[in-house]
Image (spheres, rainbow, N blue to C red):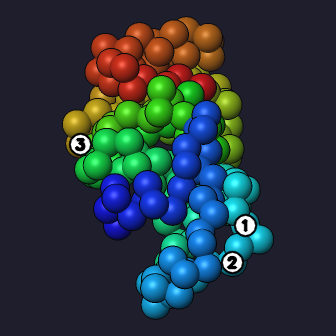
Amino acid sequence: MNQALLRSLFTYKRGKLYWKPRPREDFNQHCTWVMWNRRYAYQVAGCIGNRGYRKIAIAKKYYFAHRLIWMYHRGWMPEALDHKNGIRDDNRMSNLRPATQMENRWNSRRLRTTSTNVKGVYKRANGAYEAHVCANYKRYYLGRFVRKSDAARAVTAARKALHKTFARTG
């Protein structure tokens, strides 16, 4: 996938890619590499997948829309792309930033199965709260706390110090 191909297929407006219309003679030339249906011209490309990301099919292969949008504008692809606000379908260029897999994970939301609803805070059997933060392949133990709010404050401070702009506490 390259920038020239993406610019020939799509137009970009406010975080969405729209299919361009293709003349019939142009379609006949390129029918081997792109399946095209004229009824989709000027419509938003792709659909929302089961994980919340928009996916777009090009030549019978699916691509994430945020990756195509980055390639459309920048012409290169980083290791990973991070949505700053955590909304998976918000693909505005101002919301996308290049990241490593680790940085992308730092900005992820908490797991839904946590007992405390605070990322990095765990309740122990004795009623105490333990706080942990992971960064640079290392797990940092922040201590045990009587109150959940104290543990949450410790995790927030550690994330801001270790994860910098990729810190997410919720």
Foreground residue among 101 and 111: 101
Question: In percent of the image, x 46 and y 85: which residue is there?
Answer: 29
Give me the disc on residue 137.
Answer: 3
In front: label 3 or label 1 = 1
Q: Residue furthest right?
A: 39
Q: Position of residue 86 (x, y in %)?
A: 57, 34
On screen, residue 70 above or below 85: below
Q: 71 left or right of 153? A: left
On screen, residue 28 above or below 163: below
Mark 3: amino acid: Tyr
Residue 17 visible at all: yes
Disc 3 versus disc 2: distance between alpha carbons? 47 Å
Foreground residue among 89 and 120: 89
Query: Along the polypeptide, which appears first: circle 3 or circle 2?
Result: 2
Q: Position of residue 136 (x, y in %)?
A: 22, 37
Give the labeled residue for mark 1.
40
Mark 2: amino acid: Asn
Disc 3 versus disc 1: distance between alpha carbons? 45 Å
